[in-house]
Image (cartoon, rainbow, N blue to C red):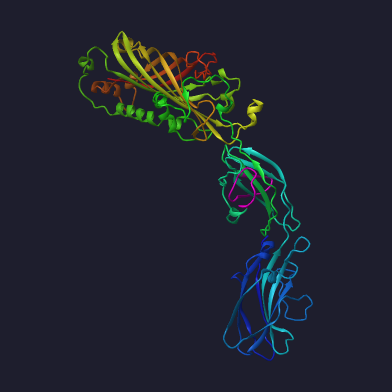
Amino acid sequence: MRRLLLIVVVVVAAAARAAPEFERFDFDGQDTLQLNAADCDGDPLRFFLEISSAGEPLYTLRYIEFPRDAADSECPLNTVDPLITEVDSEEQVPVNDSITFTNREVEPSFVMGPGACPAADGGRRDQVLFCVQLLALPDDLEAVAVASVAVDVDTILPPTPTFTTITGADSKVLVGVEEIVSEEGDTTSFVVQHRACGEGEGEGEGEGEGEGEGDDEDDGADVPSLCGATGSFVATTGAAPTIEVPAKNGTRIELRALAKDDFDNRSAPTELVVAAPVPDLSPLDLYDGGSNAFSCNPESCSDSSTALLGGALVLLLRRRRRQRSSLPLGRTAHWPALLLVALVASTQAVAQVDGEPNPDAKRAWPGFGRATLGLGVSSYLPNIDADSSFPVYGCFFEGATLPRLSADGDFHLLDAVGSLQVSLGIDLTQANGFAQPAEAATSLVCQKPTATKVQLSLATLRAGVTYRFDPLLDWFWVPLVPYARVGVVSTGYVFSKDGKIQEGGENPVGARFGVEGALGLMLALDFLDGIDPFTPNATKRARANGVFDHTFLYVEGAWQDVSSFGEPGFDLSPKDEFFQSGMPVTWKAGVAVELM
């Protein structure tokens, strides 16, 4: 513990002479000193002394060490005080009317006093005043002035630490040390010195991981290595019971520890120990189902694979990491949201015109070229665990049902008895969770999650044909319009860990294929024209302008089998969690607008 150390200057006037004064007395510009065992062999200290006098030309300086009983103790004026221990020969200095300034180098042991260096009986801890007495010649009976610098001395070394545990974790090694209780009341911390092992025995790069602590970085450059490490150690400072030492996954480090007290006294280091980080497990580390035929990792993806997966990856890889509680709608919805804004704006930006032109008069056949655009949100619970004995999705992502954002475009081929359309769509979602500790691989039981984030990003592309039965809407203004769709689907997936695509293991990037059939019901909103107090007759005016014909709310149930037609690997089919039917069904609701 650092103590407030003060310079105590006492000036006493002699009865028969003008009193001299100490203007300055310090060491290396410091008013206080805190010295430890290493200072015994350290660089010399330089003390500075300034004395002014208006009278006598000659005085004797005497340097003494005086034990303090309290922080405000003062060096004595009486030269025969039995507590005074003289530590240096007397020195005569002339002092005239001007200020006399002296400085010289002294060994730290001179300031620390006898018995401090070398440390006797395991060291010494004491508080002293290093004093300078000014005695008048020739009698030298008592000091006429005295100055001092308060000094705290601690040369007691803490004991060598004891390791309790050394455990590998993700991107770090956890070093357990036994707490040390100092008899002197010091707060003991620990320094773990570490460096990277070489690629082969006797071959090392000497590169440590983590942040160094100045003078610790050069320690141990000549210490024989256990694992081919060379160069200096890097230091990580911490407290009991556990110190985290950063280390790169897939490498080994060697380390040792030493204790450090408040005076920066350092113990002897422990023996070297070799350790390695143990990465947290991602979903693919524990997935034991069939391997996906159409998949790759960042190292093996071919140009053809990249081209086929490009549409999904462009959307997924731009996504940033988010907190566990985040929903995928926040960043997934940014570009469909722009489309929705444009659609809503188009319903408001229609001008009043006379008459209702017939857009079909310019078409090759009725309805050809029209488009229906829609946005929706569906529920999605992927059936990934169907082919794995370990509950990958249930363990890492807590079996969560995900909201999935959808964008659809239906392009009309023919409007006769109902409309026949080519349909394209995309669904986006992401599951967020936390990695598992290494023991999950041996226990095959879901453990307490770690702090390492994992993500599963999914993009589903859909293509098909839609039939919409809308004659009753066009002819008799019946607002309910049923529809049906059949098509094919492809779901691209990306597994990532801490925002980066996982490396190694089962291929983290891939796609699964399947088919879908959907039934839905649309509610045309034309009837709102007559009751809307803000934009009355908006649909009528938009139709007259040739902007859009109808706007809809819709609900849909879709049966999707995304298991690559029974091939081994991930089953990305949805599970019906709404009605608990056990079928691969997802439910969706949204809005749509039919452009003219």
- Between 373 and 263, the one nearer to me in the picture: 263
Q: Is residue 445 highlighted in magenta?
A: no
Instruction: Please tell me which residue is depicted at 67% across the width and 65% down the height of the picture.
Output: 41
Q: Which residues are magenta?
A: 220-244
- Between 477 and 582, the one nearer to me in the picture: 582
Tell me: residue 16, above or below residue 128: below
* Position of residue 131 measured from the top left corner of the image (x, y, whole percent): 69, 75
Q: Horizontally, is 576 left or right of 407 in the view?
A: right
Name the residue at the front extreme: 202
* Position of residue 107 measured from the top left corner of the image (x, y, whole percent): 66, 70
* Position of residue 498 measured from the top left corner of the image (x, y, whole percent): 52, 35
Instruction: Please tell me which residue is depicted at 62% across the width and 39% down the height of the picture.
Output: 276
Q: Quadrant of the C terminus?
A: top left
Q: How many marks?
A: 0
Q: Is residue 237 highlighted in magenta?
A: yes
Tell me: residue 531, above or below residue 30: above
Q: Quadrant of residue 363?
A: top left
Q: Quadrant of the N terminus?
A: bottom right
Q: Horizontally, is 29 left or right of 164 in the view?
A: left
- Between 298 and 5, the one nearer to me in the picture: 298
- Between 512 and 294, the one nearer to me in the picture: 294
* Position of residue 361 measured from the top left corner of the image (x, y, whole percent): 20, 15
Q: Quadrant of residue 286?
A: top right
Q: Quadrant of residue 398?
A: top right
Name the residue at the top extreme: 417
Name the main secondary structure of what is drawn in magenta: loop
